Image (cartoon, helix red, strand yellow):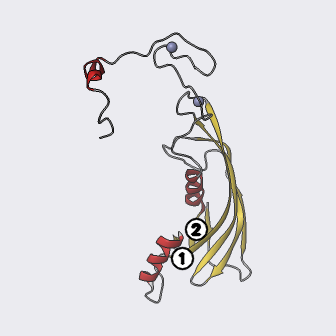
Amino acid sequence: MIISLVRLPIDGLRFEHRYSEGELDPGDRDYILTEQPLVSGRIDKAGTGVRLRGEISALMVRPCDRCLADVTLPLEARLDLLYVPADPSGGRSGEIEIQEQDLGISVFQNDEIDLDELVLEQLELSNPLQLLCREDCRGLCPQCGVDRNFEPCDCKPPIDPRWEGLASFGSSDENG
Ligand SMILES: [Zn+2]
Ligand SMILES: [Zn+2]
């Protein structure tokens, strides 16, 4: 969804949007949305830009890195963001660039804010690099494939033939 900043009311603009299924395209991201994002808040003028305050909620599901069981990732966040125009008048672009790095200021173009972009970014922020269903997840057995959280198996870890010869040298510099 695009929010137009043209004729932004002097006392701010309120918005609320519940995404419908398929409206947001997460591309090749590694999660699926089980509850579509709900985003609401207000936009006020702030200097040459605008300030967006509000909240966002959604539910994502992603498989556990070890056992592939579905893990639900709730997104529940407050938003307080400053947007500055992409081409600020007055030649202050250098200053803006520094602020942008320091404070996480976003940039808008053509007097509009792309809410989809913001939502995808927030989803990504609450999507951890490593995801386990629980800290001590035992994962799937690489040999027989059972979920070792539920079912023990008698598989012995295979000995990689490449390591057999190296074993006698000890484990000196595996970490480089
Ligand atoms: Zn797991
Ligand atoms: Zn096994």
Q: Does any portion of residue 167 appear in the rendered image? A: yes
Residue occupying image coordinates x 47% and y 79%: 96
Q: Does 89 sit left or right of 42 as displayed?
A: left
Quadrant of image for the N terminus? bottom right
Q: Nearer the viewer, residue 38 or 6?
A: 38
User: Horizontal and vertical percent for residue 165?
Assistant: 25, 19
Task: Say whether disc 1 or disc 2 marks the residue closer to the N-terminus.
Answer: 1
Q: Secondary structure at mark 1?
A: strand
Residue 164: image location, x then y, percent: 29, 18
Count all numbered tags in the image, as a single digit: 2
Residue 52 lies left or right of residue 125; in this view the side is right
Which amino acid lies under the numbered mark 1 shown in the image of this protein? Val
Residue at numbered disc 2: 113
Residue at the disc numbered 1: 84
Quarter holding residue 160: top left
Mark 2 residue crowding within 10 angstroms, few (<14) / some (14–19) / many (20+): many
The answer for how far apart the CA atoms under marks 1 and 2 are is 10 Å
Task: Look at label 2 and name its amino acid.
Answer: Ile
Mark 1 against mark 2, which lies toward the viewer? 1
At horizontal 45% and vertical 82% (from top left) the residue drawn is 95
* 2 lies left or right of 40: left
Spot occupied by residue 81 in the image (x, y as percentages of width and height) = 61, 69
**x, y percentage for residue 90?**
46, 90
Which structural element holds mark 2?
strand
Q: Residue furthest top?
A: 154
Q: Which mark is residue 161?
A: none
- The residue that appears at 60% across and 35% down in the rendered structure is 135
